[in-house]
Amino acid sequence: MSFHFPDFAHRWKYIYHKRLALERELSEETLKIEEVMKLIREAGLEKTVCKLGECYEKLVREFLVNIPKDCDNPLRREYQKVYVRGECVNFSPNIINNFRGTDEGGAAEVEATNNQIFQEITANQLEVWPKKGKISSVKLSMKYVVLNRIGAANWVPTTHSSDIATGLARFIYAIGTKTKMDIGRYVFDQTMRHAKTDAAKFPIAFPTLLCNIMLSQHPYLISTVDLPMKRESPLTFHQKRFGDNHAPDLVGTSVPAPNTGFMSKEEIIVALKDTYVMLDERKTQFGLMTHALERKDAGAEVEEVESEKEVEDEDGSGNEDEEVDVEGEEKHLVAVLREQNNLCLPFFCLLFFFWIWF
């Protein structure tokens, strides 16, 4: 372990315990979703999802622990320079953009209101961003379902793929609408956060990109103790993720159907993981609907007590509207529960097949 300055040593315990969000490559089936891949290429993010190369965890953490807090200060001597294992690594938004093969341009942040973003990623199904600050992924259109899952794994790392916070929503909005965004500046700012805060809640994003930038300048920076990290299986998308709950904004049949022939052990594991994520999203939806129905029931009880005291025509019409709303909610819940049963059956069949086979 090398520290450029002795006072960097105390930061190691914080950097060491941060989650390193190793990027996942896209499966061959996902690469066939032409509309999404075109958006990713135009955003200059293809190198973050395809042909990623090796990533060395220890080297990435050493890089982060040696970033000066004033690395982004043009008045400092070590402006945009990071010393790793005795070598000076030039690190700036321009260098990141050049490595990605794109020109500098655009803003580091998306200049759009939360409501505008909400309308776009839900295909105008909803118009107002919820007060709780997150939205359920079941509300997303097909295009943004794909971008959200890729983004949660590779661009704005999070383990909560069923709920979308504003940061991830803004990022996939910029990609989906082809908004000019300075990705180099974004990556640089996200990396600088690890130098300026010891909070463990911020995962380490773009580790393979950081590794590639270092090794492009100093190919012999890795040592014999550096071992490449093992990646998870490629990101794939089961056809059932694109059901009636998501607005169909992907053109034609660009979302491929899964293979119906013999499945390998790896394919079964991927299918199980994908179904698990899908069921987790349904769980969130059920919680929201249950809460809504409970509020309706509570409101109905209050109206019933008040109606006993005073009966008016307006109260009668109001109760009638609420009954219609409750009835509509109940019908919607029954329909979703039926759909959920259809989704659970193949999931448990896969589990049973996996148990018998292996």
Image: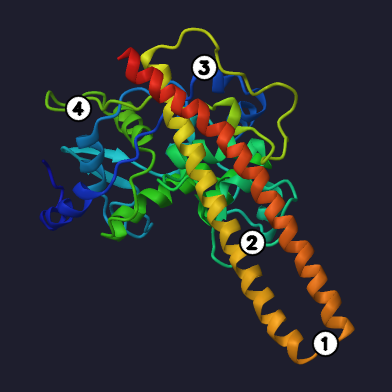
Labels 4 and 3: the sequence-earlier one: 3
Residue 121, position as x, y percentages in the image: 66, 47
Which mark lies nearer to you, 1 or 2? 1
Q: Are marks 4 and 3 in contact (CB under 8 Å)?
A: no
| Residue 269 seen by the camera | no
**Residue nearer the viewer, 261 or 43:** 261
Q: CA distance from mark 2 to mark 3?
A: 34 Å
Residue located farthest toward the top when viewing the structure as drawn: 262
| Residue situated furthest right in the rendering | 313
Q: Is residue 125 left or right of residue 172?
A: right
Label annotation for residue 222: 4
Q: Residue furthest front?
A: 308
Against 177, is 325 above or below? below
- Label 4, secondary structure: give it: loop
Which comes sooner in the sequence, label 2 or label 3?
3
Q: Position of residue 96 (x, y in %)?
A: 44, 38
Which label sits in the foreground, 4 or 3? 3
Q: Which mark is residue 311?
A: 1
**Residue 11 appears left or right of 37:** left
Dot 1: few (<14), some (14–19), or many (≥20) neighbours within 10 Å?
A: few
Nearer to us of marks 2 and 4 is 2
Q: How far is mark 2 from mark 4, CA to CA?
A: 46 Å
Q: In x, y percent, where is residue 78?
A: 28, 51
Disc 2 crowd, CA 10 A, few/some/many (<14, 14-19, 20+): some
Q: Quadrant of the N terminus?
A: top left
Camera-nearest residue between 87 and 133: 133
What residue is shown with label 3?
28
Separation of marks 1 and 2 at Cα, in angstroms? 38 Å
Q: CA distance from mark 4 to mark 3?
A: 31 Å
Q: Residues within 10 Å of mark 4 (few under 14, many from 20)?
A: some
